[in-house]
Image (cartoon, grey):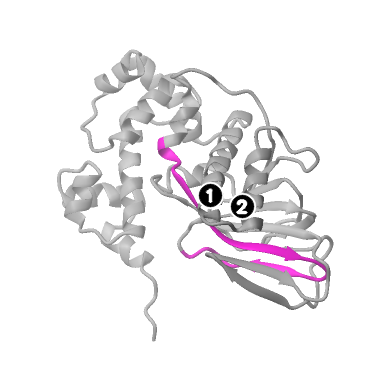
Amino acid sequence: MAGPIRRRAGGSEAAGADDPLSGLAPLLRVQPHLDDVCRFGGAWAAPHEQEPARQAYFHLVTRGQATLQRPGRAPLQVTAGDILLLPRGDAHVFHGVGPPPSTQLPVTVRHAQSLRFKTTVGAEPDVELICGRLAFEAAPQTLIVTALPDLLVLSVGAQPLAIRFAPLLAGIREELNDLRAGAVAVAENLASALFMMMLRAHLETSAPAEGLLRLLGQPLTARAVRAMVRDPVHPWTLDELAATAAASRASLVRAFRAAAGVAPLEFLTDLRLGLAHHRLRTETVSLDRLAAEVGYQSAAALSRAFLRKYGVRPGQARQAEAPPTAG
């Protein structure tokens, strides 16, 4: 599997009301949850287990250098100004530069507002990490999260920080250092903008093979995708989608097949089933209601389509995702 994708901040920005990158906005409503401010020195390690709710992990390196270790992967050195996103919430460990320590210094934990402040005891901190989780609120995981690499690193730089990202990254750090009233809420709003910019930078500077990002990367297909995402329940026809995209039916089909290997209405089916799969994992909803809310005429029709796509019925998928009961 490919290694982490590391980006430099910057790059050109498209302009105009028909900017295809604006299609990311309704798809990627990201809600950051800040958890920890870690200030470590000496021999330290900070493990993170697989995120059970499949939220993304993110880390802002605001001071010093550290090592990211993931199972089966080569260590990755990160430095101040790096922003890391693990879209699938994979398990990982941070530790100091060099090999993992055999013994670790104790860590004190102080709670303030909704944050944990973690500090090593017995060594002057030389690394600061701001850690949290990122929820992709409106996006079905099958369409968004799987279109991203296992690890995305935006290298903003330490001295100086890139102009666009400096105010956001510095603002988050200042809010959490000062902890004035509403600091966490302000920091999370800044982080939301930061990650939208991060994902935009990834799309601008990569040439992904994933169909969704290719579709969003060209105006003709992006207009049709945005329409379907805004209203997946609408009984879209190829004629309507072509009119929305300001293209002929044949041109739209060719563009979709070239970008994603599927026709527009096949993409719509994937979108609806992805939404259904996401809802089954995250909500308790009847199959009749779910079918209506993702564009199917009946629970039976949804169940048949779900089985063709995922190899299991919706009820089986729900049971597989249910947490184990305590024994």
Up-down: is 76 above or below 100?
Answer: above
Query: Label 2's element?
Result: helix
Q: Residue at x 56, y 44 (%)?
A: 190
The amino acid sitting under disc 1 is Val
Q: Position of residue 166 (x, y in %)?
A: 68, 39
List the residue tagged with mark 2: 175
Which residue is at the front of the view, 121 or 146? 121
Q: Is residue 29 left or right of residue 88?
A: left
- Few, some or many residues within 10 Å of mark 1 (<14, 14–19, 20+): some
Q: Which residue is mark 1?
A: 186
What x and y, as percent, mark residue 169?
65, 45
Per the image, label 1 sits on a secondary structure element best described as: helix
Residue type highlighted by circle 2: Glu
Q: Which mark is residue 264?
A: none
Cβ–Cβ below 8 Å for labels 1 and 2? yes
- Does 127 lie within the magenta span? no
Q: How many C-alpha atoms fall within 10 Å of the one at disc 2: few (<14), some, or many (≥20)?
A: some
Q: For the C terminus, which image quadrant?
A: bottom left
Instruction: Give the camera-side residue of 235 and 17.
Output: 17
Residue 93 is at least partly visible in this image: no
Q: Is residue 220 above or below residue 208?
A: above
Quarter of the image where one finds residue 236:
top left
Boundaries of the magenta span: 26-52
Q: Is residue 34 visible?
A: yes
Image position, residue 120 (x, y; %): 75, 72
Q: Give residue 322's quadrant in the image.
A: bottom left
Q: Residue at x 18, y 52 (%)?
A: 289
Q: Earlier in the sequence, mark 1 or mark 2?
A: 2
Which residue is located at x 20 percent, y 58 percent? 286
Inspect the magenta stretch and tell me whether residue 42 lies in it: yes
Rendering coords of residue 160 (x, y %): 78, 38
